[in-house]
Image: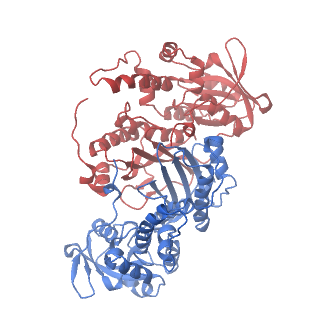
Chain colours: A blue, B red
Amino acid sequence: MQEKNRTEIATLGEFGLIKHLTEGFELKNESSKYGVGDDAAVLSYPADKQILVTTDLLMEGVHFDLTYVPLKHLGYKAAMVNLSDIYAMNGCPKQIIVSIALSKRFCVEDLEDFYDGLRLACEDHHVDIVGGDTSSSLTGLAISITCIGEVDKDKVVYRNGAKETDLICVSGDLGAAYMGLQLLEREKVVLKGEKDLQPDFSGKEYLLERQLKPEARGDIITKLAELNIVPTSMMDISDGLSSELLHICTQSKVGCRVYEEHIPIDYQTAVMAEEFNMNLTTCALNGGEDYELLFTVPIADHEKISEMEGVKLIGHITKASLGCALITRDGQEFELKAQGWNPLKEKGN
Amino acid sequence: MQEKNRTEIATLGEFGLIKHLTEGFELKNESSKYGVGDDAAVLSYPADKQILVTTDLLMEGVHFDLTYVPLKHLGYKAAMVNLSDIYAMNGCPKQIIVSIALSKRFCVEDLEDFYDGLRLACEDHHVDIVGGDTSSSLTGLAISITCIGEVDKDKVVYRNGAKETDLICVSGDLGAAYMGLQLLEREKVVLKGEKDLQPDFSGKEYLLERQLKPEARGDIITKLAELNIVPTSMMDISDGLSSELLHICTQSKVGCRVYEEHIPIDYQTAVMAEEFNMNLTTCALNGGEDYELLFTVPIADHEKISEMEGVKLIGHITKASLGCALITRDGQEFELKAQGWNPLKEKGN
């Protein structure tokens, strides 16, 4: 790895650091009135919009591993995860506020990398960074991001609106981010052991990209609006398809049938699952961090949805008494269980 | 200390835990449309209001010490610190969102205590808890709180509006929270050493309360509105009077004169400073965490402000070229310096 300059954070101080990192940030959205530099950000939304607010707290060693995640990617992903939550309400993200706590092993250049990633994600999605704050941590890095967005008053989509006979749809493909993580974890040993040895990721770029540089699906929200489709329920897939589907079904008081053969899976994910000797469907059902959108639409929208690029119909909603099940390729029914990643069951002391 | 029950967090899981903690929370504000349980909170503010958003990330060992801070107080204070930022913009806090990352040494009962404190602070200030999230941390506790509030469109008060001849005002009294911290730090040795030995805090209750249970000054904001006073600049005092005054002066491009004899100090603070052999004025100028309001008003408001209970006039704004200075009791001028608490200069690795 190339040696880079190291400027100690203490040389700038808290206020100098924030100024340095956020200098030249322009506020581009009409709703962003005042950004970094006061006790709070000032926003102004029109009366016909509802405001969406979401926040995420990411901890080093639990939510990310800096052994193989470059800080620029971490910044990008930390922003995307939050934008994705706003899209999942059928909204449009407009502002983020970023708080970071970091230990002494981090330098100014590290934070510059992190902010480069943040900025890139925000520029792609026309989001303003309206607040920042850094302080210290005794061990490791903690990142808190708050994202604010807007949605037309009658267009908010919750998790609890799915109705019997609704179609279940999912964007993109599933399981690749999880496979990317497995790949990185496997190569971590290599990355740690021999400094000059570069792991060979050729042919697996898509998996790495899905893990390291996920894309929040604002494009799907735009398309749905163009087609005049308002989903009856929606979530983003961060913990795995099974887990999210169960949330929708529980909150909507319905059941579901999902067809194994219709779950969208990329070729590279399949190859990798075989290499790792893992069950591909399990990976697609329970692998987290895809940040694709899972939503339901009334059966009347069947034609419109079938023609929509990048969206697959994977099943339908049933009455609650039928439970939530996966129909395998050979026609068997299995109860869906949430085996998604649960950060509360991870190691810790 | 009394032994309490210990329920492991894993027995509830992430979703069970949030449900358990937030069950029975009612949304009371008109602007709170949907709270805990979806990808984002949904808010709705009228068009004549601007929206204020602030966030804070608090790390164990840096921002709080659980040796002497009970979790209920921590919850209360974590909320107050954020409400204070909204008041400091002349706004009114309406919602908070809470994210917590915690290591395995914490149990469900700990979180209940923390939430009790949060809830108490929110009830006192008519604020709704509209989002919650818990995950794990490898070491210690991290708390991120986002607070959302409103303010009339023409009433936002920034840090950058102070003008020459404006009067400098401060609410309450200063230095007591810092003295409370010194006291707790001194007794920490006692608290650690002998289990049954209770430190004697009698006669020092006010100092402890200021440190452990600060109050955000919403009452001052209400009074200012009643008196039809819109400050020209405002901040809350979290890092110390000197540091905050310098922020206002730098951002407003002005100077200031502050009179030592007018700085409000409580009797207990003075007694304690003597006991610790500390300079009282230095404590009041540089001790942080008072969460009082520092603001400037046009000289035309002199009469109204002088009659306002709980507010003291401590100096005035000058042109920038005169710099920022403290006038001591014996008439000497000293340049004001920010020696406030800087979490980035703290220990860490």
Residue at position x 28%, y 56% in the image: B13
Residue B187 position, x and y percent, is 39, 22
Counting every numbered tag in the picture gives 0
Residue A271: quarter of image: bottom left
The extreme right residue here reads: B321
Vertical relation: B306 (above or below) A276: above
Q: Nearer the viewer, residue A230 or A327?
A: A327
Vertical relation: A222 (above or below) B71: below
Q: Is residue B222 visible?
A: yes
Residue A214 position, x and y percent, is 50, 69
The extreme left residue here reads: A321
Residue at position x 49%, y 32% in the image: B219
Q: Is residue B74 left or right of residue A97?
A: left
Residue B168 position, x and y percent, is 65, 27
Q: Is residue A168 visible?
A: no
Residue B244 position, x and y percent, is 62, 33
Q: Nearer the viewer, residue B199 or A87?
A: B199
Q: Is residue B58 left or right of residue A115?
A: left
The extreme top residue here reads: B330
